[in-house]
């Protein structure tokens, strides 16, 4: 069994900055939920409003935008980090695209019409590139590339 050394390029700093920006994104989304809880009077520990019309629908859309981002966040981070080890600038750019897409996704959801969340679907292009970058990184470690 042979070991593998991975050299971190100085451009990986861009990836680290994007990771910090994802923290800002998550906190902004969380703040929107806190404000919506107050506005629509949805008390803790309820995750969603049981009122499926009017204010309850609006709160649920705001909460769902945050929740879905949290659901896809772990894999996004993993792909960003591993893909960034091989292609730091491209991966950082893909991370920025993902962040912007999550803001657009949330803004679409915040209209109260869940169908408008798909405006942020372009972020999956960034994730796809991150996936390819990560696969190339793995193949490089395995000496397949």
Image (tube, rainbow, N blue to C red):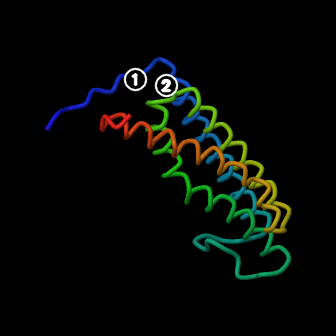
Is the Cβ of the residue at disc 2 closer than 8 Å to that at disc 1? yes
Q: Is 145 on the left-hand or right-hand side of 110?
A: left
Instruction: State the residue at coordinates (75%, 55%).
Output: 106
Q: What percent of the width, then of the height, locates residue 23?
A: 58, 41
Q: What percent of the width, then of the height, locates residue 115?
A: 81, 67
Most extreme residue toward the left, as rendered? Answer: 1
Q: What percent of the width, then of the height, locates residue 107?
A: 80, 54
Identify the disc placed on residue 8. 1
Q: What percent of the width, then of the height, locates residue 105?
A: 75, 55
Circle 2 SS class: helix
Residue closer to the observer: 5 or 33 = 5
Most extreme residue toward the top, as rendered? Answer: 10
How packed mark 2 is, by other alpha carbons closer than 10 Å (few <14, some 14-19, many 20 or more), is some
For residue 50, above or below residue 104: below
Instruction: State the residue at coordinates (59%, 30%).
Output: 90
User: Which residue is under mark 2?
Assistant: 12
Residue closer to the observer: 80 or 53 = 80
Distance of label 2 from label 1 (alpha carbons):
7 Å
Instruction: State the residue at coordinates (51%, 29%).
Output: 87
Residue closer to the observer: 1 or 57 = 1
């Amino acid at each position: 069994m042979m070991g593998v050394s991975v050299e971190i390029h100085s451009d990986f700093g861009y990836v680290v900055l994007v990771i910090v920006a994802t923290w800002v994104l998550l906190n902004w989304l969380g703040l929107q939920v806190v404000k919506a809880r107050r506005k629509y009077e949805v008390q803790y520990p309820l995750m969603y409003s049981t009122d499926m019309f009017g204010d309850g629908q609006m709160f649920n859309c705001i909460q769902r935008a945050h929740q879905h981002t949290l659901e896809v966040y772990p894999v996004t981070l993993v792909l960003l980090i591993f893909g960034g080890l091989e292609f730091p600038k491209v991966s950082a750019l893909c991370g920025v695209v993902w962040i912007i897409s999550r803001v657009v996704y949330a803004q679409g959801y915040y209209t109260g019409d869940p169908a408008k969340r798909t405006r942020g679907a372009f972020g999956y292009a960034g994730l796809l590139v991150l996936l390819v970058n990560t696969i190339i990184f793995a193949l490089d470690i395995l000496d397949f590339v």
